[in-house]
Image (cartoon, rainbow, N blue to C red):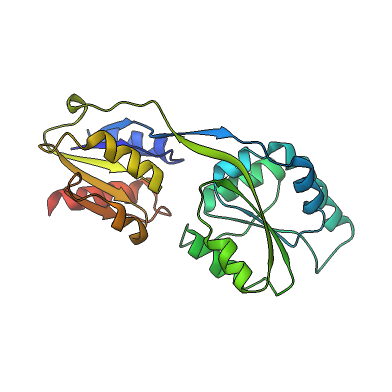
């Protein structure tokens, strides 16, 4: 068998090490690249000082708004200086790796769902804290899901989104010779990446290909004429859990 990493993963180094120990082939073939977009930096800075909630919808969102990091730090310092109990800025992230990035860059412990690294999972956390009339800022990439905006709006929360980067299809290649005779597993975390890799694999029907996706929501987009099967592995899983699930599938 062979594992292909199609979407950027924080766990890649750990996966690579586990594959080396288990004599499993692994190769990174990233389908997407991130590029910065133009957005109103000053407007975002201004709104940070009065916002109740700040949502980073991805790890890339954190890194591509570096021009706003200092303002976020200043708002946090102001909240602490005035010893605010209410009206403090709360930062939310999708997943622990994004939360670790926030801690590293702005020195703040953000909130996230420890069991579900998805927009739905994060909304469960936000709903426990937010109240009608709050103001939320969402920092994301173009083409990102609107689930959080929609749910907050339903709850009478004012929402302003800033698109700080966009995903574009990378100039990557994957050919017949890259795939092995056994099972080929493709780890994909977004719809745009799934569509990109399906376009590359459409002329390789004789190779066995299994898509590994993070949610049932993506399953409907898996092209059964291209992939022989798919697995759902939650993206909150550890590298060891990924390998265990793949090895379990191999034995079935």
Residue 31 x %, y %: 38, 34
**Identity of the residue drawn at 40% across and 44% down:** 192
Toward which corner of the image does residue 188 lie, by quadrant?
Answer: top left
**Identity of the residue drawn at 51% across and 60% down:** 119
Q: Is residue 202 above or below residue 118?
A: above
Relative to 51, 244 lies left or right: left
Residue 215 x %, y %: 36, 58
Q: Work out whether residue 22 can be spotted.
A: no
Q: Is residue 96 above or below residue 171?
A: below
Q: Work out whether residue 183 can be spotted.
A: yes
Q: Quadrant of the C terminus?
A: bottom left
Q: Is residue 229 above or below residue 150?
A: above
Q: Is residue 18 above or below residue 123?
A: above
- Compare residues 170 and 117 and report the one nearer the observer: 170
**Identity of the residue drawn at 59% across and 62% down:** 149
- What number of labels is visible? 0
Q: Quadrant of the N terminus?
A: top left
Residue 30 x %, y %: 38, 33
Residue 177 x %, y %: 18, 24
Task: Pick out the residue farthest to the right.
Answer: 82
Relative to 18, 166 lies left or right: right
């Amino acid at each position: 068998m062979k594992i292909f990493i199609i979407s950027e993963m924080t766990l890649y180094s750990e996966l690579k090490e586990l594959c080396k120990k288990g004599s499993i082939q692994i190769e990174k073939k990233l389908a997407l690249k991130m590029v910065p977009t133009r957005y109103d930096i000053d407007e975002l800075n201004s709104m940070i000082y009065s916002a109740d909630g700040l949502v980073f919808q991805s790890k890339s969102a954190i890194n591509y708004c570096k021009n706003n990091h200092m303002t976020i730090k200043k708002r946090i310092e102001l909240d602490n200086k005035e010893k605010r109990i209410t009206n403090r800025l709360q930062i939310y992230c999708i997943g622990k790796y994004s939360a670790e990035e926030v801690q590293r860059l702005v020195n703040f412990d953000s909130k996230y769902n420890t069991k579900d690294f998805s927009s739905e999972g994060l909304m469960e956390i936000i709903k426990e804290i937010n109240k009608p009339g709050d103001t939320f800022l969402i920092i994301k990439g173009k083409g990102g899901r609107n689930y959080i905006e929609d749910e907050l709006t339903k709850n009478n929360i004012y929402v302003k989104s800033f698109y700080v980067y966009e995903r574009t299809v990378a100039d990557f290649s994957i050919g017949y010779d890259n795939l092995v005779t056994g099972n080929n597993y493709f780890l994909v975390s977004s719809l745009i990446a799934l569509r990109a890799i399906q376009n590359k694999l459409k002329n390789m029907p004789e190779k066995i290909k299994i898509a590994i996706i993070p949610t049932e929501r993506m399953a409907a987009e898996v092209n059964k004429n291209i992939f022989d099967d798919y697995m759902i592995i939650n993206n909150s899983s550890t590298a060891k859990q990924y390998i265990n699930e793949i090895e379990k599938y191999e034995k079935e």
